Amino acid sequence: MLETFFDPTSIALIGATDDASKIGGKIVLTLLREKYAGRFYPVNRTSNRIAGYAAYPSIGAVPDSVDLALIAVPARQVPGVLEECAEKGIRNAVIFSSGFSEEGGEGAALQRQIEDICRRTGIRVNGPNSEGFFNVHAGVAATFSPALDVPKPPQGSMGTGIVSQSGGLGFALYNRGRQRNMAFSHIVSVGNQVDLELNDYIDHLLDDPATGNVMLYVESFRKPKRFLELARRAAQLKKPLIVAKVGRSRAGQRAAASHTGAMAGSVRVTDAVLDHHGVLRANDQDELLDLAAAFSQGKRMRGDRVAIVSTSGGTAVWLTDTCEEMGFEVPPIDGERQARLAQFIPSYGSTNNPVDITAQGVNAYAQTLEVLGDADYIDAIIIASSFAHDTRLKKEGEAIARLVKELDIPVFIYTYTLPSASSMQILQQLGLFCYSTISGCVRGLQGLRAYSKFQEELNGRFGAPDAQALPTCVRRALEGTEATMCEYETKHLLAAFDIELPVERLAKTPQEAVAHAADIGGAVALKIQSPHIPHKTEAGGVLLKLETSDAVRQGAEAILKNARLHVPNADIHGVLVQAMGKPGLEMMAGIVNDVSFGPMVMVGLGGIYVEVLEDTALAPAPLTAHTALKMVQSLKGYPMLSGARGRPPCDVPALCQLLVKLSQLAASSGDRLVEMDINPILVHEDGAGLTIVDALGVRSLTP
Amino acid sequence: MLETFFDPTSIALIGATDDASKIGGKIVLTLLREKYAGRFYPVNRTSNRIAGYAAYPSIGAVPDSVDLALIAVPARQVPGVLEECAEKGIRNAVIFSSGFSEEGGEGAALQRQIEDICRRTGIRVNGPNSEGFFNVHAGVAATFSPALDVPKPPQGSMGTGIVSQSGGLGFALYNRGRQRNMAFSHIVSVGNQVDLELNDYIDHLLDDPATGNVMLYVESFRKPKRFLELARRAAQLKKPLIVAKVGRSRAGQRAAASHTGAMAGSVRVTDAVLDHHGVLRANDQDELLDLAAAFSQGKRMRGDRVAIVSTSGGTAVWLTDTCEEMGFEVPPIDGERQARLAQFIPSYGSTNNPVDITAQGVNAYAQTLEVLGDADYIDAIIIASSFAHDTRLKKEGEAIARLVKELDIPVFIYTYTLPSASSMQILQQLGLFCYSTISGCVRGLQGLRAYSKFQEELNGRFGAPDAQALPTCVRRALEGTEATMCEYETKHLLAAFDIELPVERLAKTPQEAVAHAADIGGAVALKIQSPHIPHKTEAGGVLLKLETSDAVRQGAEAILKNARLHVPNADIHGVLVQAMGKPGLEMMAGIVNDVSFGPMVMVGLGGIYVEVLEDTALAPAPLTAHTALKMVQSLKGYPMLSGARGRPPCDVPALCQLLVKLSQLAASSGDRLVEMDINPILVHEDGAGLTIVDALGVRSLTP
């Protein structure tokens, strides 16, 4: 769709100049230095020759058709110029000029004019306030960024596509990555996103054969749901998305809002949604690059077991620590393989994992790769060496590169010294990437492993049945006139989705309460039901374990009286008479309808300890059974459910089933339900189900 | 003490050669390249001239006195050579040769010979199996490491001293640091530590005027208690210790053990002890350097409030996020200062924090520093820029450098692009350090803040009264013949340290139990007391809330019977009759006597939830009241104690007092007490104290 945008056969630059101190001049220089191979038309009111090319006084005067217009004129002239471009039939434009919505006032008005031209004429616009883009392999450098001044990646290499809501950071990522020998396909600065926005570029890059993964710097998702669709498509295409999502802190949001004019979504929800969609997240430019580099071999990592091969004992120990701390195992090597290693590893080295080939070993890396590469208990190998000098690489670089290609498992390379320029050159020629920090290397491995796991779980994560049409009773319940739904109303919603509830009935009077209690049998609880009394206990609106008719009648009278005292004009629906629940582990669950990403389901351990410790898990609705179980298992307090310290295990399957049904309710209700809190839930012993003790829903009153 | 070792007026190299492929040849080259200014005597059996110097057939033949012997001969010749050195009166030696304890067998025997020579002659030895050392300012490069091949730091600069249990990693740290313009004073590879060990070098560096902080790579602390003494001295001298402690994982310990022949201590204890002593810890080479760089301005950071000044909106947001996530605040700027900033910051920038001076601002960094530098609500400033080109630094580098020196608060500099060589050169000339990762920059700030806080708290942390002589009753109690101490015995220890206990008495018979219960009054608990039944409940040895004489008699009979059934030959001391405790928040506390670091005190929230979540804090005994409170406040569940969700606050002062007294017991008992577990403790409402319900001690049987 963006083919002629990213790979135009002809480009016009409005605002072209020979003055290299101006943006228009910088774009000319960059475009030509990166060897743009198509036709180029500089547009300048006064010069008729720029950088050796014929220049034209206006875009209309250009004698030929133009695929892409680059606009670098003062903000006030931009709408006129863009209009002329559209009239000439140009389909794509980049607006570098700043002075638009980021400035407010007149700038914002100018931006609205541009928006209007886009809508009216269909011209596709990147920017304004953009640093442009670089299509690496086609050699289209439509940018004034100084960061391209590094050697280009080899032709034909599959690489990373960068889409950035900060031009400076986006191009800096390319610059830093190139200094580490990484391959790239495109870099795009999105600017103010008046027309083309984040998702449009991602969409294009997913279809681009030269793009293996997509790296994003994001301050806000303008169209979060479309992003999720793209994330799902990326998963099918096995192209990882690697994202830095900023504007996470309060002060950061304040800054992002003033910087891009958009508020960031809820941090916890965003994290949960991105995790669920297999999107890898990074907190630093280097971490983004470390993660992307992990995919350069195009391999999966099947399990958590890592072999470490080193010439430095200290490095081996440090890597081993970091691997274990980041969730990997460093398993021992079997006796037969150790014997083979001992044939070329000196006695003061180590044939066990971490393997120490010692500084003396000749071709010992390659030989060790041969021995360990097919061990079925090893899922990845890290080679740790020193490339401060190129001796080692000259000696066995080619053999290592061949084995890296041949072996099924990923082989990561790490140097504990900074690599010399000559080492970097050899690595580049061999097509090998080299990490130079331990944490970056193991973080890369962790990202690769997480993504491999995500790919294995794809069906489990995304196979949930679609949202269904709401049953009439639910639709009506959600059309109430009070935001707060009483417990009994909320439970009607749950019941409509086949969620099992304790035996309970609504009584309008104390007399009815007595009758209901007799029907239910045994001890009962009484609870006031009023949309104006969401906190029932605080209002004296709850009584537990009432066993006799007298106790029930007096209790119901007391509760009703308390309620009227507590909230004088409250609309009171009655008193809920409920069978007392069996004991069980206290849990809670809920629904939150996120402004950006839609309905989410939450689960957590209950009780005050765990509320203080905020141990909860969150995922987008609807859930599969697989995801529900993963959520429950991810709780720090999960051992409580699975049977810690000699306690019997709880009915985890019943809890998971509840979450799945709750997620269907959430997905089907969509924006009509703002949130729901089911708390407490008593989860009984394995096989004995659970009891939903209380529930509170909040409707949306603005449909 | 190590003056003539690190700064010798004459050096002899035994094993010197002109063959640069050999270690002896590499040392010659390195020593001369780094311009060793003293007398140099190569020793070689066959040549009489090496590198232009007169060479001698043996060390004995050297005509002059020698301060330092460098030994690079095959392992088997080392003892003989060392003996000759000692005979010649040489006081210091570095043994580069490998083939000693790291190889086992004959090598280990050779190492024992060296050890013997050291003990007998008093010669101080670094190594064997060492990469030697580099005294940067004196220009003594007694090493074969290739990593010195980088420009030296400016003469007279105060810098980092590196002591490393891995030669490769130690010199790589210097190499990496120099490529980031950092200053260093010494680098020492400790080798197998046959004589001089880690602490000896630290000791020397603490007294060295050119060393501002000490960086350590540690696989194991051989003399942990001496290290702690040095850490306390470092604190007084305000010289931070920055440590990578590896061998933390199981597989890492396996590797470290085979690599250095020493086992690593308990990870949690080591962490707690290092934290307590203000030792900064890093997980990566770059993190070590990021932390050391934070101290290069020689400033403290008084509080948590950071101002960010940037030319890139994206960078500002990202830095702000990271600051908040790492515990800092990014406070708003006051109106008066914002007005002053608005005089030179364009309207599309931001005068609030994070401050966006925009790419257009001329001299805007320096001007902003002038405005913000004296705001009493800002404790540090981060300048974020792009140094891919040197324009900005050429323009206002000098003004920035001047302000960095003049301002009281630390000013950190970060570039979101990699700095160009020319930028690095300017930064070097200006004496400015520049971070190039966000996480590194904020991690550096975090280390500086942590160390400043530590310095403020010095008296609070280390003012605890010394261990006291044990009261006779305690000494006797600790001389028992069973490892396990019964509850009542353990409580005698607590009572001797003035710790308040519930009313309780030991009954030998059911009749005595009835009498004791009557004396105590009210409901009582009964508990079996036997060193062979540490888990009383599992043995049917506990009964609670007994209210009548009959219940007490029958209960005591039942408990005694159960105990005999459960452990037929158990030595039963009787039944403890105890007043029932008031309700309270369940906590636990304890003592662990660590093999390396000695007695530690532990505190944690009790109850099964929190046991599963393992929420505990640990510190070395004895504790001050300050440290006890910090421990309690560091618990994730602390809000439970301080009064979360409308609950009344608990008696935290009583809990802290208990910890202090317990720590005195721990410190005074020393190795005689292996561990103690006080669990549960019921902490009552504020002012109402606490109840120690149960306690179990373990004695050391090998005095």
Image: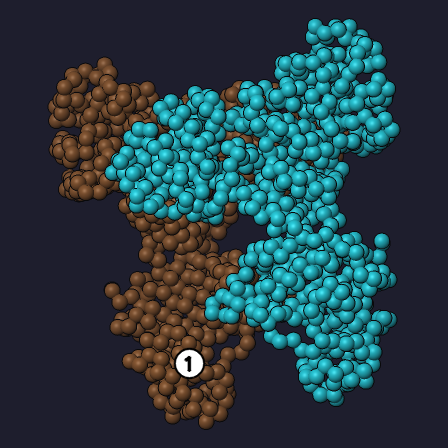
Chain colours: A brown, B cyan
Mark 1 is surrounded, within 10 Å at the Cα level, by few (under 14), some (14 to 19) or many (20 or more) other residues, namely some
Q: Name the foreground residue: A668 vs B696.
A: B696
Quarter the N terminus of chain B occupies: top right
In x, y percent, where is residue B355?
34, 40
Residue at image location 81% in from the left, 14% down from the top: B59
- Helix or strand or loop: what does disc 1 sit on? loop
Residue type, label 1: Gly
Residue B376 image position (x, y, % from top left): 41, 44
The foreground one among B55 and A687 is B55
Residue B438 shown left or right of residue A644 in the figure: left
The x and y percentages for residue A110 are 17, 39
Residue B399 shows in the view: yes
For the point 64% across and 59% down, which residue is it?
B603
Q: Please report the residue visible at 22 percent of the width from the left and 42 percent of the height from the top.
A: A104
Which residue, given by chain and number where applicable, does mark 1 sit on? A540
Q: In the rendered view, would you say A25 is above or below B343?
A: above
State which chain disc 1 sits on. Answer: A
Residue A269 horizontal side relative to residue B129, left or right: left
Q: Can you see residue A173?
A: no
At 83% from the left and 10% from the top, the residue drawn is B61
| Image position of A47 with respect to B417: above or below | above
- Camera-side residue of A107 and B625: B625
Residue B313 spot, x, y in % from top left: 34, 38
Count of residue discs: 1
Say which of B374 and B61 sits in front. Answer: B374
